[in-house]
Image (tube, rainbow, N blue to C red):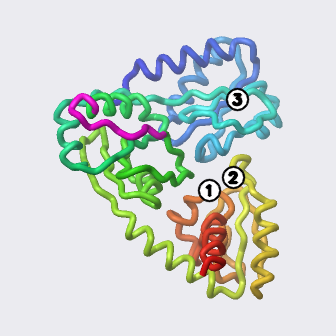
Amino acid sequence: MITDSIEERIITDVLKDTKEYSRIAIQAPEGLKKLSEVIARELERSGKEVLIFADPCYGACDPKDEEARGLGADVLVHLGHADFGLEKCIPVLFYPYYYEVDVSEEDAARISDALGDRDFSICFSVNFDRIAHRLASALSSIGKRPRELQRVLGCSFPSVDGVALYVGDGLFHPLGVAVNNSVIAFDPFTRELNEISGEDMDRRKRGRLLGVLNAERVGILVSTKKGQQHFRDALVIKRHLENRGKKAEILVMDRIERDSLTGYGVDAYVNTACPRIATDDDLGKPTINYAELVELESEEEKS
């Protein structure tokens, strides 16, 4: 599943790419914290000063480049994710972690049976890029050619033609894809196949929308994370809600969590940060995303 050769390649690349730097910061998600320690020890052996950020790392939307610069670091090593183009104040080196798992003929046959005659596209997170392409080749060889292969982020809810065949582990990404699609999830580690319907997601979404529409006071959530910060949108939302006769206030924080919101006298939230906050997290009050509010306004204008 996870081989030493993958980690050895990343360590080799980091040592090579950071030769010109003297103080190096490392940022890693939960599953790669041990690897960050190994890299730190190797860098220190070569005479570098190293610091490791211990805060949760949610993705490439949350690089700690400004914090690293404030601590005198020359470069930030970011493990596990791929760069999606945010502006940084110091160099940030990204090292995606690509899983290596073989796809068998039996896997392809089982997935083909589950798909039936339906058109499909393959969705995957960056870590499963190579496995997804292997599966696409295996399915194509038995006459099941995907319409497209689409890399997804945790914050993206893509729409695809036909069924979305998600390749990866866990439910985090396939539940996001299920917001707009019917999903068949294939876990290449366990070989399990699960079909996820978007109907339940639709019911939850309608309930959240009604909760915000019926609210008298609305909190507008803004994150200070670089890739999630949309303060200008929050100002637009505030004016819009007040024009509808609601009271609205902008609540700003780094990590948007229920405990941090306790004590504010609002009835619901509009979220401008990571869209998964509205769909996955229980903030104790109905919560919708900014995009859902825009969608609701568009539907009202048409009716």
* Residue placed most toward the observer, 246 or 13: 246
Q: Amino acid at mark 1?
A: Cys
Above/below status of 100 relative to 65: above
Residue with the most extreme front position:
302
Please tell me whether mark 3 sits on a helix, a strand or a loop. Answer: strand
Residue that label 3 marks: 92
Query: Which residues are drawn in magenta?
Result: 140-150
Magenta residues, dominant SS class: loop
Residue shown at 64% from the left, 72% from the top: 298
Quarter location, residue 198: bottom left
Q: Position of residue 87 (x, y in %)?
A: 77, 37
Residue shown at 47% from the left, 40% from the top: 150
* Residue placed most toward the observer, 82 or 43: 82
Side of 89 relative to 128 (left or right):
right
Please tell me whether mark 2 sits on a helix, a strand or a loop. Answer: loop
Task: Tell me, for residue 228, which label it has, or none.
Answer: 2
Q: Amino acid at mark 2?
A: Gln
Q: Could you classify mark 1 by the number of other residues whose Cα lies within 10 Å: few (under 14), some (14-19), or many (20 or more)?
A: many
Task: Tell me, for residue 274, which label it has, or none.
Answer: 1
The image shows a total of numbered marks equal to: 3
Quarter location, residue 223: bottom right
Q: Amino acid at mark 3?
A: Val
